[in-house]
Image (spheres, coloured by chain):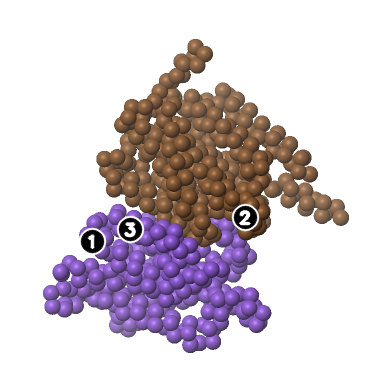
Amino acid sequence: MDMLIQTFINGTMGSLILILVASGLCMIFGIMHIVNFAHGEFYMLGGFGAWLFFDQEVLPLFGPPAFRYILSVILTMVAVAFIGIIVERVLLRRFRGSLQSILVVTFGLMLIMQASTLIIFGVTDKAFSSPFQGYLSLGNFHISQERMAAIITSIVIMLMLYFFINKTKYGKAMRAVAQDAEAALVLGMNFNLIFSLAMGIGCALAAVGGALVGPIFYVNPYMGVAPVMKAFVVIILGGAGSLLGAVIGGFVVGMTEAFVSTYFGTHFAIMAVFLILIFILLVKPTGVFGHEE
Amino acid sequence: MKNKNTTWTTRILIFLIASGILLPMVHKDPYFLHICIIIFIWSILTFGIRIVLITGHLNAAQGGFLGMGAYFSAILTMKLGWSFWISLPASGLAVAILAMIVGYPILRVKGAYFVMITFGITEVFRQIWMMWKDMFGGPQGLFGVPKPSPIDIAGLHISFSSKMPFYYLALVVLLFTVLVMRRLDNSRLGITLRSLPQSEMLSESIGIPILLYKLIAFVIGAFFAGLAGSLWAHYFTYASPDDFNWTNSLFMLMYAVIGGTQTVLGPILGCMLLLSLDEVLIEFQEYTPIVLGLILIFILFYLPGGLISLPQKMGSLLKWRKK
């Protein structure tokens, strides 16, 4: 029973991080129809950002550690969003609509980003700890404060994203573009602005995922490869461009992974995740919450 | 115009084949032969991904099929004691049958979703190899795959302990691939396949069984991946799950796109150029991905048809200048 609850808590954290990464990917895919292989590298940059700002103290941040950590995460998000916007402007914009070129370009980008971080920061894993130490004990089981902080932060960010998408002018514009790009264009929406915004927010979401996971595990140039594959499964489960789908898909994949790997081993877990993907696509080729294009 | 192009392609192809046959007689350096063998194996793989790519589908399962070919061949020779000469075609056929079973349901899926589902397939294959220790050797893979057994042709005893015979073996398999692909390109099937990305709906409405055509392309691609896998296993004498992941499929895609997918020359040129670049840059290994990525982006920006469209592009530039 204890193991069940423990697995459930770990699964919750894994799912929430996955939801962050996947909802970023989902925005990019849903609005721009870009399959971004380099998304995991923005996640990786997020991890390195938190390491640089918080652990290495490249900027003279002040205040108590918890405050500095939150500030580092915000700084990382802004920095990575900025990089994402530049990438979209310079590289991706001209290949809009061509699936094959986009795939190849983002693969090239992935190679470049991995190799550059490898050269700059070295191949060794960077381990650092967040200011939230110790355990919260609730009766018989324990949860580290680090993980609790990651869970709370991701819930807060997802709520902010929900508010932004549904209540603000730009959020509504993004949804409109995702639903019917041509109609939105006819109505005179600024596509370039919306694309930049979507890419920026998408990359920032990946970055915050990396920044939250960094202290719990470790940071290295290849840390983004595994999460992005799972994030792809999530958005396919959820259907392109459906944020609710990404949340549900994230929980399905995250929980499946946590439970199967606890009870059957990691190999089975990865296989189970991809078997779900294959099965879903066979039954409904556009994802569970997706719609025909 | 088209005729002129095809004759040029043929001439370059004949030149490449002739130099492929003659070069090792002049230049016997084992390191050089090793690079050539790697280029040959990757070219076969890239042909396999290209045939599906021209239908507008990016087949990321190719890396998985390569692995399956390698493992099949290793198991047939090591556990069942078959000769390499039977297990080479057998592993090609086995992978083709596997692709037929896998491909029939998944080829209804389109675009980005197809890429994802084929990624999933490669990943599922990989987990199977890692889990099934008795059969596939687990995370270490299978070691001690035998080199091809010696053969006697026309009184000549050829043993495969040195690199030279293997070079010719890989060259022969590559030639076979090129011939098949060339025939396919010019056949009715090839033309139909190339018409599919324009509009599947239109093709379907005039009575082309598109699922069948796509399946044929998918199975042919997988067959060559199986052959390449067999060569791979018997050349490196091991098959390990780390070698056969989804990045391999993306590398094949990269070679195909950089070379160009219009004619059969493209994959060969792409593999030749990029794999030899890998060797040139071997001292600056950590910088290689950056160079590859930059070349890739450069080609997509300025030469979307790949390297083979370079003469055409130059020609049109010159014409434009004259005006």
Quadrant location of the N terminus of chain B in the rendered image: top right
Residue B184 shows in the view: yes
Q: Amino acid at mark 3?
A: Ala
- Which chain does tag 1 point to? A
Residue under the point 47% across and 40% down = B96
Q: Amino acid at mark 1?
A: Thr
Residue under the point 82% across and 54% down = B321
Q: CA distance from mark 1 to mark 3?
A: 13 Å
Q: Is residue A11 left or right of residue B255?
A: left
Q: B99 and B262: which one is in front?
A: B99
Residue under the point 53% across and 36% down = B40
Q: Would you say the residues marked 2 and 3 are in contact, meaning their CB atoms lie under 8 Å apart?
A: no
Residue A283: horizontal and vertical position, in percent? 43, 61
Q: B251 and A116: which one is in front?
A: B251
Q: Which residue is denoted by mark 2 in the rendering?
A: B204
Q: Which residue is denoted by mark 3 in the rendering?
A: A272
Dot 2 and dot 3 within a common chain? no
- Which chain does tag 2 point to? B
Shade representing chain A:
purple
Q: Which residue is denoted by mark 1 in the rendering?
A: A262
Shade representing chain B:
brown
Q: CA distance from mark 2 to mark 3?
A: 35 Å
The answer to which image quadrant residue B133 occupies is top left
Dot 2 and dot 1 within a common chain? no
Residue A84: horizontal and vertical position, in percent? 51, 70
Is residue B218 positioned above or below A29 on the image?
above
